[in-house]
């Protein structure tokens, strides 16, 4: 006896990654009923990297020297799990970090600029990449504001 069955996925999704088995109910010529099960087959779903996002902490639009450090964290979706590289400015040849995060420890004007996170993964010997950028603006410390905080104002009244 030969039995053929086909399972077709019209749009494979990440949640479809699991073990599948074929179950066949057989009614033989004598009217006896039996169940035949196939061996499990694992469907692996691989997803090219996408949805690259950058989070900067503290979450501000402008920084000054009072900030101890700035942590940039990159996340992306993909399977296999994405790997990350960080670049500063237009120099995509000089990698400043191979991790999903980069810490600007010296919060000075020279470290202002555009930071790029490139996420990538490899599926069947093909590299997939996606990137995102964030602009970090480190300005001068507002000295006038510091002096204002140090001034005592006294009021006297006469009757």
Image (tube, helix red, strand yellow):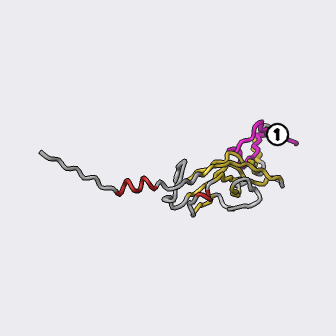
Determine the image quadrant of residue 108. bottom right
Residue at mark 1: 5
Image quadrant occupied by the N terminus: top right
**What residue appears at the point 79 percent right and 39 percent down from the top-left corner?**
7
For the stretch drawn in magenta, the main secondary structure is loop
Determine the image quadrant of residue 51. top right
Q: Where residue 109 sits: x, y (%)?
A: 59, 57
Which region is colored magenta? 1-30
Residue 32 visible in the current orientation:
no
Q: Nearer the viewer, residue 75 or 17?
A: 75
Q: Where residue 126 sits: x, y (%)?
A: 83, 52
Q: Which residue in the rendered view is the most extreme toward the bottom?
A: 105
Residue 107 as seen in the image, left or right of residue 41: left
Q: Nearer the viewer, residue 130 or 17?
A: 130
Q: Where residue 24 sits: x, y (%)?
A: 77, 41
Q: Does the magenta stretch include residue 25?
A: yes
**What residue appears at the point 45 percent right and 56 percent down from the top-left corner?**
143
Residue 80 as seen in the image, left or right of residue 6: left
């Amino acid at each position: 006896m030969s039995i053929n069955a086909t399972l077709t996925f019209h749009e494979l999704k990440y949640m479809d990654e699991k073990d599948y088995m074929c179950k066949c109910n057989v009614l033989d010529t004598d009217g006896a009923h039996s169940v035949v099960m196939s061996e499990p087959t694992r469907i692996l779903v691989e997803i090219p990297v996408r949805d690259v996002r950058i989070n900067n902490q503290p979450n501000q639009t402008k920084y000054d020297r009072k900030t101890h450090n700035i942590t940039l964290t990159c996340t992306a979706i993909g399977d296999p799990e994405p790997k990350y590289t960080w670049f500063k400015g237009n120099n995509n040849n000089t990698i400043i970090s191979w991790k999903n995060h980069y810490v600007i420890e010296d919060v000075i004007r020279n470290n202002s600029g555009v930071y790029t996170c490139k996420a990538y993964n490899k599926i069947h010997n093909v590299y997939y990449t996606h990137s995102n950028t964030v602009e970090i603006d480190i300005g001068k410390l507002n000295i006038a504001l510091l002096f204002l905080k140090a001034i005592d104002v006294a009021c006297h009244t006469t009757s």
